[in-house]
Image: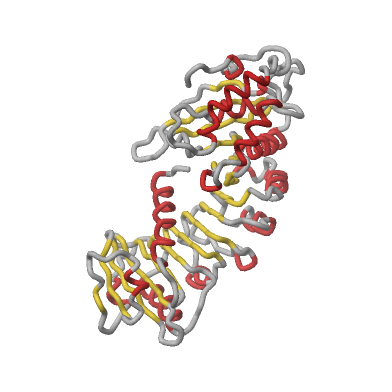
Amino acid sequence: MEDVPLFLTPVTKSEGGDNPAEPGSKELEKFLQRQAPSLKGDEQVGNPLDPFQMIKLFTFGSAKKIILEQSRLQPNSEKELIIVSFSKMEHKVSIISKQFPDTKWSIMVKGQDSVLSNSSFKFDSSLKWNTFTELKLKNDLAKEGTSKNEEKFLQILTLDVITATSKLFDFISEMYGSVDSRLRLMYDLIDNGLDEIINIFVEKSNMVQYEFFSFDEKETLLKPLLRKLNHPKELTVLSQSYPDFQYHIELRNVLLESFISYGASFMKLDEIMNIKSEKICLFEVNLNQFDLGIIINAWMLGWNPQWKALLMMIDNNYLEIESLVEGKCFPMPVSEDWGFLDRNPQFPLIKFEKDEQIGYRRRRDEDGAAITFSIRQYNVFKIILSPAEATNSYTQYDEWFDTTIKRFMSDDD
């Protein structure tokens, strides 16, 4: 960034005192107005404020007022993603910014048995400019094939990690005005403040994505957590595939927009069929071709599940999709887009080969509703349900599937 003011100089060590002298309102206003187009989402601006500079500026009252006004002008499509991560050894709040797609901005919250009262970077009741110190850590994101190749760090020292993390999350949420938020919890928290974390964060209305990683075979963690979730949009579960694990997830009382499970070999067919979620993505599923036929035939006979789109990566089974249909089918021309499936309801059975997928679109005689199922490679099976009057029903969910698969394959955020 050109002409960075002194008040944005990174803090590299503890220095006594509170915030440095707040810059004059005219200096701030002039500087922020110069940056305002980038905050409104104008891609033509080459030097937008990065998240760390925004955070430090937001600790100044005069800057906060201007930033909040600019945030209100930012379109909802430009929402940033905030990820709050808790594990036994690490606690952090990360920002995934659309303006900086190759960088992850993380603030580590480090607990201390004692923090000197005169330490300027101690977290107490409010965040100050000197609360944050730069932290040099090994960059673990520089992986081939991932979209993010750098992670930058700040650090906060505190006596109360959970409360400090909560206040930091609220601070960043207010700064951006409109955010998507994700709470990531690791299994090793079960005896390290898990209940307190859940009780605090489930009450935050903008915390709508939840990720639970590495559960034990007795499911002592997952069930109590699910009972407390009252407004999740997305739920992600990463579980170990223990031989005797029984999947008793209480999703029948939790209505989700999307449910993702990494390591779902323990899920039974009836449990998959009865999940209450518009979109479902399951990896390492232990079903076979006969099970898939049951789902399709049940729908053809009038069964209507709670879900609209289901993707399963079938484990250790080679699928032959042709065996799931019978009768004469109309081939979709290669030159046609996916909208062809919705524009031609007169064909009860359409076969397509497009974008490395082979599949079929079938319609029910009773209501004209459609089921589209396809296979990619040899074990990625996809089902999309749509009403008779649907338009663009396939691509509506296909893009979400692709994003979820890439996230799974790259272990990215």
Residue at point 69% right, 44% down?
Answer: 197
**Would residue 185 be seen by someone viewing this image from the given angle?**
no
Q: Viewed as shown, does residue 316 lie left or right of 80? A: left
| Residue 208 screen position, x and y as percent | 61, 52
| Residue 157 drawn above or below residue 89 | above
| Residue 332 drawn above or below residue 379 | below
Q: Viewed as shown, does residue 258 lie left or right of 391? A: right
Residue at point 48% right, 39% down?
Answer: 98
Residue at point 42% right, 67% down?
Answer: 393
Total tally of numbered discs in the picture: 0
Residue at point 31% right, 69% down?
Answer: 359
Quarter of the rendering containing residue 286: bottom left
| Residue 193 screen position, x and y as percent | 70, 42
| Residue 123 screen position, x and y as percent | 71, 26
Quarter of the rendering containing residue 396: bottom left
Q: Viewed as shown, does residue 315 lie left or right of 119? A: left
| Residue 27 drawn above or below residue 76 | above
Looking at the image, which residue sits at the far bottom? 366
| Residue 411 drawn above or below residue 18 | below
| Residue 272 screen position, x and y as percent | 50, 68
- Nearest the viewer among 93 and 286 is 93
